Amino acid sequence: MAYFETIGKIEYEGPESKNPLAFKYYNPEEVVMGKTMKDQCRFAMSYWHTLTAMGNDPFGSATMFRPWDNVESAMDKAKERVHAAFELMEKLQIPFFCFHDRDVAPEGESLEETNKRLDEIVAVIKEEMKRTGIKCLWGTTNAFSNPRFVHGAGTSCNATVFAYAAAQIKKAMDITMELGGENYVFWGGREGYETLLNTDTGLELDNLARLLQMAVDYAKEIGFEGQFLIEPKPKEPTKHQYDFDTATVLAFLRKYNLDKHFKLNIEANHATLAGHTFQHELNQCRINGALGSVDANQGDMLLGWDTDQFPTNVYDTTLAMYEVLLDGGFTKGGLNFDSKVRRASFEESDLFYSYIAGMDAFARGLKVAAKLIEDRVLIDFVNERYSSYQEGIGKEIIEGKVGFKELEAYALEYGHTKNTSGRQELLESILNQYIIETK
Ligand code: XLS
Ligand code: CA
Ligand code: CA
């Protein structure tokens, strides 16, 4: 059964096209910096926002019109969702998907039944993957929705809940491996605290590290070669989440000797919630060799929560792709649209318009970023700005040849240095020119 019968395959028609159901910038086979756009972007559909988000908010119930949900049993619904998902991805030319265990199959009465249900749906997903060639970018565990995780999962005060979370992750890793997932993500939805009056943060963080180490050990045991990723987020649902931002996650990983096993999955909206730009978080991953994958969305700067909107801001997509390209491009990671249509965009066609908007915004960002790198506009400026470290005293500082005494002697002789302008406004205007003019 086809669920989007009136919509055909979305093709690239170029920037002159007025067809709302066509790509204006995403041209999958076009080569940008040595790779096709398809391989540079590695777009993925988020199963949760696309198939299961119903438009509920704290003040109102579901608004989405989703014909594949018009079946009786929860398992039939889960199966129909698989078909709808793959039809949508095929038509939008999206080569990957990402999923939580609980997005694809409903929980049963017991863990055993839940796992059986997962196996049943995974078989359907596998068939669709075989039919379409679409792959799994990453899998993850939803260890935050069920009330059992009220005090956390790996950081719960209740050891039975820790055990349950471990069992759930074990199964999610099994199915991610079965589906050929290239990464496995940890987002600590309830791994944080509301008040320090009742919280042993030391034990909670030690336990979180223990859980991650168990995942590393289990991956080795079953031969899972996917990349482990941690996705930082500073708050929501908990007041303070342990995986606050890139810097916090890297410090945590290093403390527990887990850094060689994990990279990061950076989400735009989480970066801004942490008081950073999207580019800042990607940049910090890049300089630490920890850039794994990206959750492509955007927040609303006027709101203080996670709105998960489809990314349409070309300024941001350009600067994000700039970091990705400087990092050498994606290997196992990709651009997962962890984005949902607004509550009032409830028709099925809105799913197409939103993905087209996001894919075009990133394709455009990719091209502008590639041009900025090819023309070396920022690279040369930055190199020149730090050129005092390429010779003389600067070189000696870098090479570790001088200490305080030598630098004091130098400062006494040459202390009255002349600084040069940082030229921020000039660079911003060049960036605008590239965004507007790049063909
Ligand atoms: C929630 C997170 C979540 C992760 C996967 O804010 O973005 O969806 O990406 O669990
Ligand atoms: Ca995310
Ligand atoms: Ca989010």
Image (tube, helix red, strand yellow):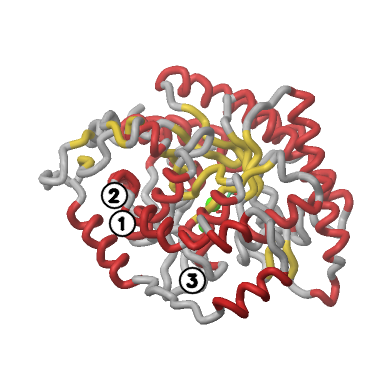
Kindly indicate the quadrant of the structure image that contains residue 40. top left
Location of mark 3 (residue):
59
* Residue type beneath disc 3: Phe
Q: Position of residue 418 (x, y in %)?
A: 44, 77
- Residue at (36, 35) in percent of width and height: 88
> Does residue 19 appear to the left or right of 148 in the view shown?
left
Q: Position of residue 368 (x, y in %)?
A: 29, 49
Badges 1 and 2: C-beta atoms under 8 Å apart?
A: yes
Q: Earlier in the sequence, mark 3 or mark 2?
A: 3
> Does residue 191 appear to the left or right of 26 in the view shown?
right
- Residue at (52, 69) in percent of width and height: 305
Q: Nearer the viewer, residue 437 or 224?
A: 437
Residue 341 shows in this picture: no
- Residue at (35, 33) in percent of width and height: 38
Q: CA distance from mark 1 to mark 2?
A: 9 Å
Q: How many marks?
A: 3
Q: Position of residue 179 (x, y in %)?
A: 58, 25
Q: CA distance from mark 3 to mark 2?
A: 41 Å
Q: What is the number of the mark on residue 314?
A: 1
Q: CA distance from mark 3 to mark 1?
A: 32 Å
Q: Quadrant of the N terminus?
A: top left
Q: Nearer the viewer, residue 413 or 284?
A: 413
Residue 137 shows in this picture: yes
Q: Is residue 260 above or below residue 193?
A: above
SS class, disc 3: loop
**Neighbours of disc 2 within 10 Å: few (<14), some (14-19), many (20+):** many
**Neighbours of disc 3 within 10 Å: few (<14), some (14-19), many (20+):** few
* Residue type beneath disc 2: Val
Location of mark 2 (residue):
368
